[in-house]
Image: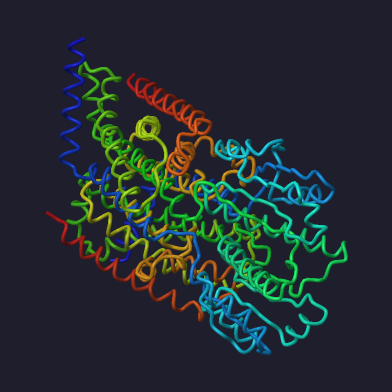
Amino acid sequence: MSGSFGRLRGLLRKEFLQIARDPSALAVAFLLPAFLLLIFGYGVTLDAHDVPIALVVENPDAVTASVTGKFAQSPYFRTSSFATIAEAEKAMDAHAVTGIVWLREDFTRRMLSAGGAPVGVIVNGMDANSARIIEGYLQQTWANWMQARAAERGAPPPLPVAVQQTVRFNPAVSSRDYLIPGLIAMIMTLTGALLTALVIAREWERGTLEALMVTRATIGEILLAKLLPYFLLGMGGMTASVVMAVTLFGVPFRGSLAVLTGTSALFLLAALGMGLLISSLARNQFVAGQIAIITTYLPAFILSGFIFDIGSMPAAVRFMTHIVAARYFVAILQTLFLAGDVWAVILPNALALAVMAAIFLGVARLGARKRLD
Amino acid sequence: MWHQVFALIVKELLAVLKDRKSRMVLIGPPLIQLMVFGYAATFDLDHVPIAVYDEDQSAASRDLVARFVGSRAFREVASLRSGDEIDALIDSRTVAMVLSIDRRFTRDLLLHRPARVQVIADGRNSNTALLILGYANSIITDFSLAWMQSHGGQTPPTVLDMRARYNPSLSSQWFIVPGIVAVLTQVVTLLVIGLSVARERETGTFDQLLVTPMRPIDILLGKGLPGLLIGGVEATVIILAAILWFHVPLRGSLPALYLGLFLFVAAVTGIGLMISSLAVTQQQALLGAFLFMVPSITLSDFATPIANMPRLIQDLTQANPMRHFLAVVRGVFLEGATAHSLWPHYWPMALVAAASLFAAGWLFRRRVY
């Protein structure tokens, strides 16, 4: 037993020395997360503000002034006036404005007589998501104007139903609060796979793994010695990311640290296991690197629920998201940060991570042994 | 000199295509990813689970609920008997939204008082929450208008008439699929180029290349042109799939698209060669490729709008070739842009390509020890 422990210690020492002497592993563990968090944290938001809007009023009077005033006051818009709709559309073609509000020549007359005067709204639909959100803001501004006008004149509300909106966990609907927890999951996916994918592949390529195999160290010890240092590095990167998210970006953290640590450990094991598997299958760094890039970053970005809602994907794609480990971790982190320890979310996802970790590590272990003979 | 360069190109292509594993990596995953991501990357709501708490249980409230359930965006998974269940359902992510109808709903409607409806959304994904609120609002507005019409109320003084240009049905696929063309082209090109010099350096064959009569510019061409070729072919396949499979309309001119593609792949090739020659080991090269790829996708307008970013970062994105190529692809596909109108996106890519290729050539010479 002490022999096994001694061998493991020796192997671990070798791995730690290797990490310390090639700073790229340290860079992956700490520099990459910090760099990505800064870019995302400061750069990425899905909340629109100061959207450039063209106002086209064909026949200006007091009524149209009250409409355009409402749009101009809104923090969501930056308005500019155009005399004709043709000029406004030209501005939209040139990407100078994203939306157009168009009050036709007979707007006031129709509104005061028959009613149902159309407020024309045109948005650039190219970015469908932004377009929908901007449409929502425009609609809200219009409804506010109608409401205010009715109230001023003591008339009944223009629309009979009053909607009260509540957004749980994120009342200000700040996209940063939801993107950053998901981002941490993505960063950890990258870190985990990158850290390990190249390590074993490199030893295969150089033939040093075969050299290790003729020693008395078992394949389990060799893999464990590979895994442990990178696991510690990954947890360190994770801690740094969470501290940055909370202190620098002010994302609330409502769960408990114990649950965060436990689930992060499970996730890291799955991510590192996947890296180990890739590297022992590929056996050369070139292919291992390519597979790592293809199977980690884009799937974690698109299929994890980090930005795109999994529930709205077609059934076949939704099914495929189950093999993306980041998917479970994103759900756990979003819940831990914004909602708290909700066991109904955490338990099934943690279980899925545990199963994935077991499968990846198990297959990597078997794969490594089979290659021996 | 040309036949030397040609020989190097052939060797590079063989190195990539002869190896079964690396050939598979180039052909399989991009196509699978295009298919999966083409369907997965959607901001459209499709049968989002909701719960309904209808305290009124009247004809009017049932009509309102039917409008929710009948829309493609929502599906009802639970009907609540008490308000206490709402929080638990949202917390556990069983539903993304709860529609709660006040018990005086019909009475208030008939008395011309504001009839109250509450929409509670899960804010853990704030984007989905915003979309849900938007859909819910328009369903409720439609209900209001229909109610007023059928109960002899006044027509509202104004109505909103909303249209979207370029993408009238606001399909995310039209927006995302052209974006995937750019993302996958970059990933594949970077993969081929980014590791190629580092691999040769690690195995020592790069030194051998340097002692041949080839000049750095020849090596640069021999290393760069295969990337250009593979990137171009890969992009063409993806563009064809976007048109034939996803039916994204191609409204502009193909030459305008391919001019953009050429400049983009040249820029990515230059950056890949630069990373590759700065790195001493393949691990460092891979790390470098990642450090370039991740921000370049994030800051490219692919999924997260540049328009919402702070001014300083918006200016920084001007140096990102992917941002410009995305503008070219989307412009040509959806807006019918021409080469003339895309000029502001061509020259930054050309500049990045020239600078990075020059730097890579210089590094080739410098990195011999």
Asked whether residue A272 appears in the rendered view, the answer is no
Q: Position of residue A158 (x, y in %)?
A: 74, 68
Q: Position of residue A88 (x, y in %)?
A: 60, 83
Which of the pair A248/A217 is nearer the observer? A248
Q: Quadrant for residue A97, please give it.
A: bottom right
Extreme residue in the left direction: B369
* A321 up-or-down from A115: above or below: above
In screen coordinates, is A283 left or right of A147? left
Extreme residue in the front direction: A154
* B72 up-or-down from A61: above or below: above
Residue drawn at the location 72% of the way across and 50% of the way down: B72
In screen coordinates, is B269 left or right of B167? left
Q: Position of residue A124 (x, y in %)?
A: 59, 71
Asked whether residue A111 appears in the rendered view, the answer is yes
In screen coordinates, is A6 left or right of B102? left
Which of the pair A87/A254 is nearer the observer? A254
Quarter holding the C terminus of chain A?
A: top left
Extreme residue in the top direction: A1
Q: Position of residue B240 (x, y in %)?
A: 59, 59
Residue drawn at the location 52% of the way across and 29% of the way down: A348
Residue drawn at the location 44% of the way across and 46% of the way down: A182
Q: Quadrant for residue B218, please give it.
A: bottom left
Rendering colour mode: rainbow
Which of the pair B52/A41 is nearer the observer? B52
Which of the pair B351/A1 is nearer the observer? A1
Q: Quadrant for residue A100, please give it.
A: bottom right
Quarter holding the N terminus of chain A?
A: top left
